Amino acid sequence: MAQPGISVCVSDYYRCPPEFLALDSPKSAPSRRGYFLFCADTTCYGGLSGQQPAASLEEPLHDIFPGVEPSNGAVHLPFDPGEVVSNLQREIYVGDWRSGSSSAVAKLYYFFRPLLPVGIRKHLQKFHLRNWDRRPFPRWPVDCSVDNLIERLLLLSLRQTGAPCVPFIWFWPEGKSACALMTHDIETKTGRDFCSTLMDIDDAYGIKASMQVVPEERYTVSPEFLESLRSRGFEVVIHDLNHDGHLYANREQFLYRAKKINDYCRQFGSEGFRAAVLYRKQVWYDALKCSFDMSVPNVAHLDPQHGGCCTVMPYFIGDILELPVTTIQDYSLFHILNDYSIDIWKQQTSIILSKHGLMSFIIHPDYVMTDRQRNVFEALLQHLCDLRSHHNVWITTPSEVNRWWRQRAQMTLVRKNGAWHIEGPGSERARLAWATEVDGQLSFSFNPPSVTVDRVTNPDAESPKTGMFSSVRPV
């Protein structure tokens, strides 16, 4: 029999009725944690039942997907998908993490960093990030291991139950195909003073952004400056405490700083937070009282702290909603890769769009002041406008995503008079969607199925055929 607890990560992701899921837990105690594959494009980290996963990425990874079989009316899994998803999203696979800012070399770097010109800094950073492109995991330029895993688990449930399709609550409001966020980290006084021009550029493309403000030491943050941002429809997010790179140096210091950060969130009326340099330690997030965080990269190959959450969707860490950074930062693009095109951004947005995920960008005012840099930034904004016009992408602000994702997490699908309905606050913006198998892959549609959708308990039922949809199309 299927076990409800093992399916929670799938039902939470899709907001689908749990009775459509047929997943069974491991038969025996899992082994030590390690790496394995669930198809070639999905790297997992966790315990396995009946076999040993690889201790490191240098070892060959075993693909367990072909061996997954039905057992007692459900798909038997030799691992706990909830554990694997949590291990990836919270970067547990990195091991006993210590902040990259805690080493003697890093402390020396951050001590002299304010005095170092960009040219010197980028050479030091290039040396630190050498061989970044040889890292096999997370997968560059976007890692969708979490999304691929959950998608395949739903597909396996479809095959096992024999249901023609599964109803679920679509990811974004009004049926938007994906979501995009523009965010600006203000690191210096020069950057702060450029914000008015930066907002003019954003406004020229009809895009509002969040402005990440450093509350101490870097520059003065006056009420007038904050009002100049909000009065134009831009959001204020707290950016670290003083941007010295030492937020997570030790637990005691972090708790002291977290209290001050929480105070600034209240004082500035900010709902969100982002750490400097994208340093993070997610197991400490309970000390932060913000509503959402934006510090975790999808792939962190070009960041001082390696890792990545391996998903393009928002996810909860306790009470905090994580809005992952899913694209390359402007600084890394310009000064590490020496790339002044939007080719990588286009490649990343294409992958994220195919997963209907969140495209999150970091553009610093300090790094788009020259004509060359500004031209690249404006090309990116135009690309986002094209995605909005031609692909129905929702371009919004972090607090709006936070509000929607929290509402969606509380919505439920209920069956009344033979039809499925979405209930809960905000449900008027939600869309009922359908997942079915087409040519061996999961396909989505807003069109209601032409057959009655209910759980089929016959484990030997054939897989659904495309003709069961009045129109089968990827959304």
Image: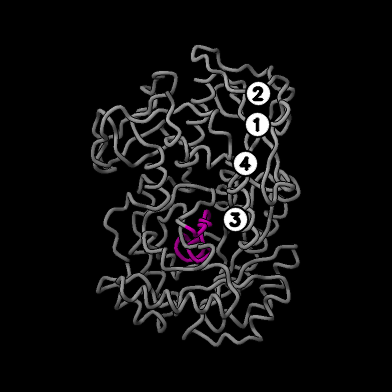
Residue annotated with mark 1: 434
Q: Amino acid at mark 2?
A: Val
Question: Left of 300 or right of it: where is 398?
Answer: right
**Is 297 a magenta residue?**
no
Cα distance, mark 3 to mark 1?
A: 34 Å
Select label 3 or label 2 by which is in front: 2
| First along the sequence among labels 1 and 4 | 4
- Residue 256: image location, x then y, percent: 37, 78
Using the image, determine if residue 428 lies above or below residue 414.
below
Indicate which disc residue 342 carries: 3
Residue depicted at x 41% and y 70%: 122
Residue annotated with mark 4: 412
| First along the sequence among labels 3 and 4 | 3
Counting other residues with Cα less than 10 Å from the Cα at mark 4, is it few (<14), some (14-19), or many (20 or more)? some
| First along the sequence among labels 3 and 1 | 3
Q: Quadrant of the N terminus?
A: top left
Q: Are marks 2 and 1 in contact (CB under 8 Å)?
A: yes
Select label 1 or label 4 by which is in front: 4
Counting other residues with Cα less than 10 Å from the Cα at mark 1, is it few (<14), some (14-19), or many (20 or more)? many
Cα distance, mark 4 to mark 2?
A: 16 Å
Cα distance, mark 3 to mark 2?
A: 44 Å
Indicate which disc residue 155 carries: none
Task: Identify the magenta region.
Answer: 319-337
- Residue 388: image location, x then y, percent: 72, 51
Q: In front here: 137 or 308?
A: 308
Q: Amino acid at mark 1?
A: Trp
| First along the sequence among labels 4 and 2 | 4
Q: Is residue 367 visible?
A: no
